[in-house]
């Protein structure tokens, strides 16, 4: 089980990376993640970015859930 400090550190790191992608692609992460899961995004040249963005967004969601519990 992660400590509160570890959870907050993970959230800070994830938020920083997520914001970078939101600025780069002019899309908020909630919408991005929905489109990504539905396969509606062009994964060609942006595959690496989209995969990383989705992973950090998922981490953020899990860590936020851990704070609630």
Image: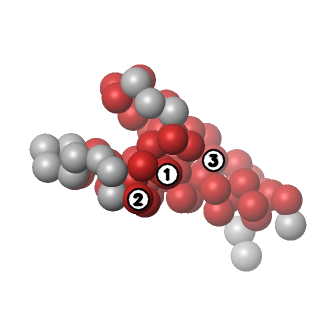
Residue 2 is situated, as x and y percent measured from the top left of the image, at 71, 68
**Furthest residue in direction bottom, as rendered:** 1
Nearer to us of marks 3 and 2 is 2
Q: Quadrant of residue 51?
A: bottom left
In the picture, the quarter occupied by the N terminus is bottom right
Nearer to us of marks 3 and 1 is 1
Q: Which mark is residue 38?
A: 2
Contact (Cβ within 8 Å) of mark 2 with mark 1: yes
**Crowding near pointer 1: few (<14 within 10 Å), some, many (20+)?**
few
Establish if 26 lies above or below 47. above
Kind of element beneath mark 3: helix
Residue 15 is situated, as x and y percent measured from the top left of the image, at 56, 39
Judge left or right: residue 16 versus residue 12.
left
Residue denoted by label 3:
11
Residue 4 is situated, as x and y percent measured from the top left of the image, at 78, 57
Distance (Cα) linking label 3 and label 2:
25 Å
């Amino acid at each position: 089980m992660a400590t509160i400090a570890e959870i907050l550190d993970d959230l800070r790191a994830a938020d920083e990376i997520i914001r970078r992608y939101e600025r780069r692609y002019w899309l908020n992460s909630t919408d991005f993640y929905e489109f990504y899961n539905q396969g509606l995004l062009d994964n060609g040249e942006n595959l690496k970015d989209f995969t990383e963005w989705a992973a950090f967004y998922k981490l953020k969601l899990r860590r936020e859930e851990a704070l609630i519990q």
